[in-house]
Amino acid sequence: MKSKNATLIAPARGKLGVLLPGLGAVSTTFIGGVEAVRRKIAQPIGSLTQMGTIRLGRRTEKRSPLIREFLPLARLEDLVFGGWDLYEENCYESATNAGVLEKDLLRQIKPFLSRIQPMPAVFDRHYVRRLDGPNVKKGKTKYDLAEQLRQDIRDFRRRTGAARLVMLWCGSTEIFLKPAPVHENIAAFEAGLKKNHPAISPSMIYAYAALMESVPFANGAPNLTNDLGAMIELSKRHQAPICGKDFKTGQTLMKTIIAPGIKARMLGLSGWFSTNILGNRDGEVLDDPASFKTKEESKLSVLEHILQPELYPELYKNFYHKVRINYYPPRGDNKEGWDNIDIFGWLGYPMQIKVDFLCRDSILAAPIALDLVLLLDLAARAEALKGLGIQEWLSFYFKSPITPPGLYPEHDLFIQLKKLKNTMRHLMGEELITHLGLEYYD
Ligand SMILES: NC(=O)c1ccc[n+]([C@@H]2O[C@H](COP(=O)([O-])OP(=O)(O)OC[C@H]3O[C@@H](n4cnc5c(N)ncnc54)[C@H](O)[C@@H]3O)[C@@H](O)[C@H]2O)c1
């Protein structure tokens, strides 16, 4: 039942179009997975919106509905998919190449996946040096390319009859770029597009096109893309929410689970060495130092923010943090991430923690993609959220959450989860849960 304090949210009527720049391992595992769930072949494990519940009111009330029944989310049956890639393979062929989903499952959803054909991409090898493909748009200026993408978005809307759209960047990690004056506001950015400014990457052109079409945009990769003044301005102006960046999946997910625990017990940290082997196309792209630098920055920032060395100099001042990614083809998408954590306890006595996470990269990313699509669409329909620009409550899903200038991001997974669930309660007019709990002892 809807609470009388619920905020205004437009109903999720009609189809929701999901637009994905980059139809590689993550995208095809996401799309194929949604279809498998719709056909009841498999379960949406790892998706908070599909599997999770939310506690409402006092513990004694025993009210814990499923999130998907509590919030007016789009239904999986209403999702329709499209995307862009520089390779011409359809989603069935791309999923087969990615080697994540098993052949038997793929066979069952082959007709559905085969129908999703990539639109020609906005791509430039300068920004992703390890890739080169034929399915690429041509245009005199970056502005022309943005106009072509906008036309693609409008055509997709018309073709599918989608009532609403969301765009999620699942393309490769681009080279490391720093914010520049050309990114600061809409006018500077548009002038830069017309002059082919080198600081404007393809992912930014997609973000610009989406926001201009009032389509919410999330970034699953660590690129500098929508975390820019111009995009924040556009997002507010067009009431198209944004969030990102870099899906929080394997090793960094573990890091943001373990580090808050170490800090909660006031244990010290002298070093954290993380290394990965990875053999998919993402691993190949990240083998290029310029793309790796973008990923490295994203992975390194989390510990500083969680441990707050400025508040706890005796515990965390000079810890050594190293992150490596090694391209190793035999493993494909089945990444292995090792962590060696040197900690110290009572009176400074040293101890070690070793983590060896044998994960599946895209299996961890796909449910995040689904949740983000559904929650961004919700944000775009919610009066209380749609004009805010950055959706900080979705930080839960990212390695490098976007925040307004001057506000540090919250990286602790458990704080992020509380923020996410309290935002859901707030939207639906339910009391926020502070976990104070004194009322049980009145
Ligand atoms: N767990 C995870 O898998 C995970 C976690 C965090 C971030 N990411 C990021 O998500 C992104 C996708 O990962 P993936 O494993 O699917 O990689 P992938 O290499 O399998 O797929 C990326 C696809 O994007 C395409 N592409 C590159 N530039 C493009 C452009 N300008 N326009 C359209 N298509 C473009 C490539 O051709 C490729 O098919 C990567 O940037 C990766 O770093 C993945």
Image: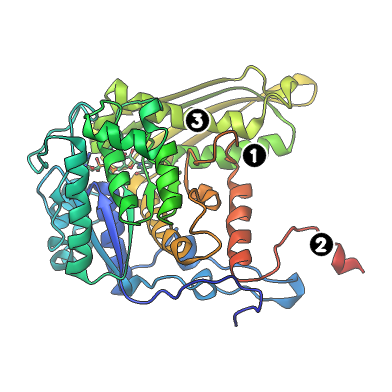
What's the residue type where badge 3 is placed? Asp
Q: Residue at x 38, y 73 (%)?
A: 75
Q: Quadrant of the N terminus?
A: bottom right
Of badges 2 and 1, nearer the viewer stands: 2
Along the viewing direction, whichever of 168 and 304 lies nearer the viewer: 168
Q: Quadrant of the C terminus?
A: bottom right
Instruction: Tell me where residue 396 appears, x and y as whole percent.
Output: 53, 49
Q: Residue at x 27, y 56 (%)?
A: 19
What's the residue type where badge 1 is placed? Pro
Circles 2 and 3, Cβ within 8 Å, touching? The answer is no
- 374 up-or-down from 84: above or below: below
- 299 up-or-down from 68: above or below: above
Furthest residue toward bottom: 1
Q: CA distance from mark 3 to mark 1?
A: 16 Å
Q: CA distance from mark 2 to mark 1?
A: 22 Å
Along the viewing direction, whichever of 349 and 262 lies nearer the viewer: 262
Q: Residue at x 43, y 57 (%)?
A: 239
Q: Earlier in the sequence, mark 3 or mark 1?
A: 1
Along the viewing direction, whichever of 375 and 9 lies nearer the viewer: 9
Kind of element beneath mark 2: loop
Task: Answer yes or no: is residue 405 visible.
Answer: yes
The residue to which callout 2 is attached is 437
The residue to which callout 1 is attached is 260
- 72 up-or-down from 91: above or below: below
Dot 2, crowdedness within 10 Å: few (<14), some or many (≥20)? few
What's the residue type where badge 2 is placed? Gly
The residue to which callout 3 is attached is 339
